[in-house]
Amino acid sequence: MIREMLFMLSGQPGALFVLTDNGQFEMCSGIADVGLCQSEKEIIKPLLKIGSNVAFLSNFAEEIKSDSLYLDVVQQSISKYVTEFQEELVEIEIAILEGSEILGITGIHSRIMPFTLQLEYLKELVDAIKLQKGNCLLIDTIQHYRDHCGVSRIIATFQEIYNTCLKVLHKQLVSWMLFGKLLDPYNEFFIQVDDSKRFVITGEMIPSCLTVSLAQQVLFVGESVVALTEAQDLSEEDWEFMGKLQKIPFENVVEIIQQCRDQMAKRLWNLVTEKDRLNRSLNMILNTFLMKKGDIFAYFIRQTENIFDGQFSSAQLASNQFALQQRLMNSLKKYLDEDETEIERLSMNITPDTPGQGWDRVFLDYKTEWPLGVLIFTPETMETYNRIFRLLLNLRRIQLNLNGLWKNLALLDKPVLELRWNLQHILIHLSQYIQIDVIEVQKSIMDRQIDQCHDFDKFRAAHANFLVVIAAQTFLHVPAMQACFKDLIHLALKFCGLFKNDRPKAFLSVVAELNLEFERLMQLLFSLLNGMYQQSSGTTMEPIAQLLLRLDFNYYLTEGLQRKTNQLLEI
């Protein structure tokens, strides 16, 4: 009987105690007739619960190796505690065989009582772990059970399991921050590689022992090490520093991350500012993508109008590419005071699979110096710059076309002159708003931030904020505004096209239709801007108010639109 009891407590069924389908031990029928008193029958009930918990934990610890580094170490920890309990049972059995004072079921119960609560808590923890996917968030689950337990022995047990999981996280952090390698065969780390092969943070997988800010620093350090390693530009000083960091215990994880971050930020800052690389790249982008040097593209547009006009096939595109690049180089060398090597880093292409005219498909490709192209001017960043560039290029092109019409318009009727003035007013002030009120203001803010820091990561944050604000204040992510801008540009192009060839017979009626279309677009534009202004608050109101002021500083357009609306209502 005693041996069967010990066998059951070790988690194994036998002749007197069987394991049911629901994972609970039960006494076989008739066991009450083997001479057990009522008190012993009552003591057996909690022993059955202990045996059931041991069987459950043993099955969990012995499960086939999971696809999780974190689950593996939890299983190893649970196995350790189950083994400790089973070793205690062996000692009890030896003591009984040697005639110890341990007498019967009551003696066994008193001996294993210290393990009862521990096994119960461990079963609850395993139940919770089984409900989630194995990853670094297991650390948070274990921490929750540790922090919500008031028994010191159980707290120590959970702390040991927690520490084993922290060791896995430590290895992953060290591998990433010191060597740029993701030690993550099962995608459990909070830094992953996305579909475009970029390293990104999976926010919902950041364990609570790390803040979002620390996670961002971890990402920055690893990306920096990857960039330096690929360029084989890690110095002896870098390797020596990495060796020192490996000796810091994981309890000081914040210190490890911050030291790595400070080292890499300083290292990369020195690298990008060496030979004035950073300033050259920023000036090149400002002068070209953001069109600070407007003369470059004024000259370029005049030289290239015949290439871009109209639709063209892939074969025509290929034949025009060389001429396009040559004219861009001529414009840059004529108006841009930069080294020829820097100028040749810039090229212009046309996306072959994008609908529309050439002007809508153009993009600049700038091959920045390493590591700026890897860590700052990424493909996504350059795509945002290109969207701004295309808008500014089209606005500049319209200005040139409208300015060239003054001789043709000298003797024409008032509706023609009025439409030309209105178009020129709106598009010129829109261009000035983007370049002066948005780009120049944000560039000065970024320059002040750069002057106050000598830290690559802080510069990267300042540049990212610069670009985000420009994209927001030029409404790049507001489709309705972009569609309105595009329609205005096409309307202006159509108006300018009326004067390229012989005037159509119904010239004035075409102008009247264009005037009606302009009025519709103005109503839409002011409606969108007023709607955004009313929904915004604080600093977000200022750029919208500034654009409204530029476009309609004396209410000429809005009052004129209102008068025409009233006249139509009267009719």
Image (cartoon, helix red, strand yellow):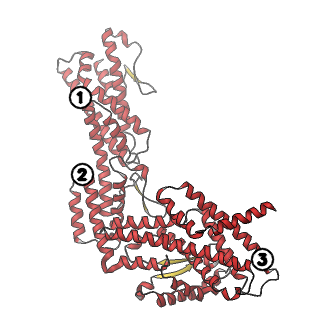
Tell me residue 216's x, y (percent). 37, 58
How far apart are the two marked residues, 2 and 1, measured between alpha carbons? 36 Å
Q: Which residue is mark 1?
A: 88
- Label 2: which secondary element: helix
Q: Nearer the viewer, mark 2 or mark 1?
A: 2
In the image, what residue occupies the spot 67% across and 80% down? 313
Q: Amino acid at mark 1?
A: Glu
Compared with 323, 486 (above or below) is above
In the image, 275 versus 506, the foreground residue is 506
Which one is earlier in the sequence, the residue at label 2 or at label 3? 2
In the image, what residue occupies the spot 44% across and 70% down? 441
Which one is earlier in the sequence, the residue at label 2 or at label 1? 1
Q: Is residue 544 left or right of residue 511?
A: left
Which one is earlier in the sequence, the residue at label 1 or at label 3? 1
In the image, what residue occupies the spot 66% across and 70% down? 487
In the image, what residue occupies the spot 43% across and 41% down? 132
The label on residue 252 is: 2
How far apart are the two marked residues, 2 and 3, measured between alpha carbons? 75 Å
Q: Amino acid at mark 2?
A: Asn
Q: Nearer the viewer, mark 1 or mark 3?
A: 3
- Label 3: which secondary element: helix
Compared with 480, 86 (above or below) is above
How far apart are the two marked residues, 1 and 3, measured between alpha carbons? 99 Å
Q: Amino acid at mark 3?
A: Val
- Label 1: which secondary element: helix
The label on residue 510 is: 3
